Amino acid sequence: HNALFFLLATIVTLSSANLHGASLGRATRTIDCIRGGGSYYESNPSYSSSSSTLGDLDEQGVYRGASVSSTLQYSRHQRPPPITQAIRNYFVSLQQFPTLFYGTTISLFFFILWQFQSTSQAAGKILRNHFVCSRYNVLKKKRLHALVLSAFSHASLQHLAVNMYAYSTFGRSVKQTLANQGVALWPFVVSASIFGSLTFLAMDRGGGSCIGLSGVTLALLAFDSLVYPSKELRMIVSFVPIQLPAYYLFLGLVGISIAGMMGLVGGNVAHSTHLGGLAFGALFYEAFKRGYVRQLNYKCRKAYYAIR
């Protein structure tokens, strides 16, 4: 109703200005010089007479500014780039963030390998032994590298697409936050993958296994939501668009993960890994806020350059 009232008031005002423009002009000519003498107005050297003002409204009340018309012309006549070029541009933009670039390309490479596990026994054996987090691989066979490599392993396209989108989206934001204190992103990603995998092994009571970057992406989401708790996030859940603050999403994911571990939420999902990622992101935020991350980063860099 307020928008409608504003629109009607604008139309009435413009109509009144057109009808009574002459009388308003005669009235303004009867005004004497302003207090202190001089002209009726003081010229501003920074003002450009070619800038867009309300005078650019035509008789129908349509704005005819150059910027708007160029935007309309661009959206009407220019086609989007081809899919191949869009993908190429995406990876070129990722090269500005090496951790995100290499994490994405490695995940894509392992995803392709998973598609040949049924036809190639060698590929399937390597993937199951070194790119899957399980008690058998990590605890019994001492394949500790599986704690990290399993995070970049995806067997389904949907799992890969969701994780890559979240990894790129929240990774860029977290990278900028960490860079303000001279901290790199890759230690966060590696540590989050290890923490999430260890949480899965600690909570797993059977012979389950876990793959995927969900623990890392949720760690990034948790850290970013605590740094910017009021950031509005948009998502689609069961074809229903939802928009809510990042902190509320963080709390909701914690609740879902706990409910999943209690068996209240079904599905083939490693809820313990998700909870581990969220917990790591929250703990990292507390350490980052208190300056512990910056101090540790300084000591590690100092030790590295001393050895080098």
Image (cartoon, rainbow, N blue to C red):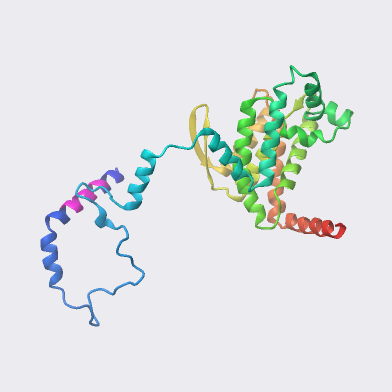
The tally of labels here is 0
Residue that extends furthest to the bottom in the rendered view of this protein: 36
* Residue 12 pos. (x, y %): 19, 50
Residues 113 and 251: in front is 113
Query: Is 214 placed above or below 122 here?
Result: below
Q: Picture quarter containing residue 101?
A: top right
Residues 85 and 105: in front is 85
* Residue 298 pos. (x, y %): 77, 59
* Residue 202 pos. (x, y %): 80, 33
Q: Which residues are magenta?
A: 7-15
Is residue 241 left or right of 251 when viewed as pictured?
left
User: Does residue 284 appear in this view?
Assistant: yes
Residue that extends furthest to the top in the rendered view of this protein: 119
* Residue 203 pos. (x, y %): 77, 31
Is residue 201 left or right of 57 when viewed as pictured?
right
User: Does residue 154 appear in this view?
Assistant: no
Q: Picture quarter containing residue 114?
A: top right
Residues 283 and 303: in front is 303
Q: Main secondary structure of the magenta part?
A: helix
Query: Is 173 placed above or below 156 here?
Result: below
Residues 275 and 13: in front is 13
Quadrant that contains the N terminus: top left
Magenta stretch encompasses residue 253:
no
Quadrant that contains the C terminus: bottom right
Q: Picture quarter containing residue 139?
A: top right
Please report the residue visible at 61 percent of the width from the left and 31 percent of the height from the top: 161
Is residue 118 left or right of 94 when viewed as pictured?
right
Query: Is 289 placed above or below 272 here?
Result: below
Please report the residue visible at 12 percent of the width from the left and 58 percent of the height from the top: 20
